[in-house]
Amino acid sequence: MAHTEKINFKEFCKRFADERACKNYLYNLRWPEGFSCPQCGCHEFSFVKSRGIFQCKQCRHQTSLTTGTVMHRTHLPLTIWFWAIYLTARDKRGISATLLAAELELSYETAWYLLHRIRKAMSQRDRDYLLSGIVELDDTYFGATEQGGKRGRGTSKTSIMVAISKNDKGRPQYLKMQVIDNLKGVTIGTFAKANIAQGSTIQSDAYNSYRKPLVKDYDHQYEVFDSNTDMLQWLHVVVGNAKAFLQGTYHGNCRDHLQSFLDEFCYRFNRRWFKDELFSRLLHAVTKSNILGSAVLSR
């Protein structure tokens, strides 16, 4: 399948050297079995060359290669989009808007716009995937503590819920991270329902707000946290990696759009086995994205 191709730098430069090549590739990604009108499903169309529009011969609905996706109504060449996606995917540490602007000779604002849209596609790709099996659950915090402020729960830092599923050998599989307003039971229950399949085993510490919202739909195993044991070991390792990712690539300047950066980290983590395919998978995610809604995850 096209979205699982391994494409190295030399192959990328060869295959996507001009706008026409990018358009052809994008067409085959969007309509692998030939054009299909998103309105009525008709396969016959006429092409309005002056506007780059496909017009359905049956209902006359007009669509383009980027209609509805996070590239919708873009004024940037597809070659720029492809390069931005490639540079984003190439390094596991990601790329900042400052560096992307320098690499592609763009303004900072344009580079930021591209990365914001790409992260949107990442988020949508993972949104409908539920963690299952044995899941570690905890809260963490991002940002600097105010002078004299409290650390840990009750801090002025931004609160984040973290959940990570484990395989039969107890190794980490998939990750979810979400910025939250508070640690009330209702908030925790909402996060769990949106991200963890019912019937899963959830392991957490004994914080009171975890108990009531998890007791009904999950096998909730909890105990008073002890840093000298392996309790929530993988979750804390991954949280440390996430903070290093945010600090190293973005120098911690992510508070205003923290969820977007967390979505990027989760997307990368959840596909760490496919690093050689990350460009094609990310391009596929961008193509299948929906600027107004969410997309079903397909690894």
Image (cartoon, grey):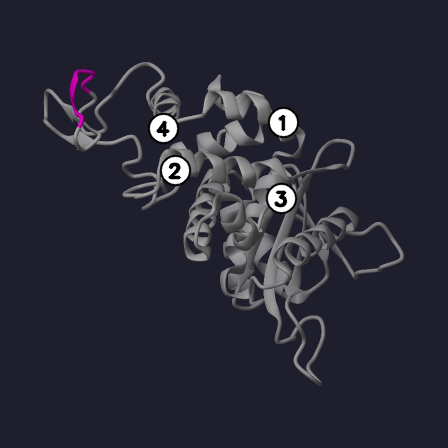
Look at the picture and state if 31 lies above or below 213: above
Q: How many marks?
A: 4
Give the quarter of the image for residue 271: top right
- Residue receiving disc 4: 19
Q: Which residues are magenta?
A: 42-49
Image disc number at residue 276:
1
> Seen in the image, is 92 located left or right of residue 52?
right
Nearer-N-terminus badge (3/1): 3
- Residue receiving disc 3: 175
| Dot 1 alpha-carbon crowd within 10 angstroms: few under 14, some 14 to 19, many 20 or more | some
Residue type, label 3: Leu
Residue 128, percent across and down? 47, 40
Look at the picture and state if 272 lies above or below 58: below
Residue 249, percent across and down? 64, 53
- Residue receiving disc 2: 289
Residue at (49% x, 48% y) in the render: 194
Nearer-N-terminus badge (4/2): 4
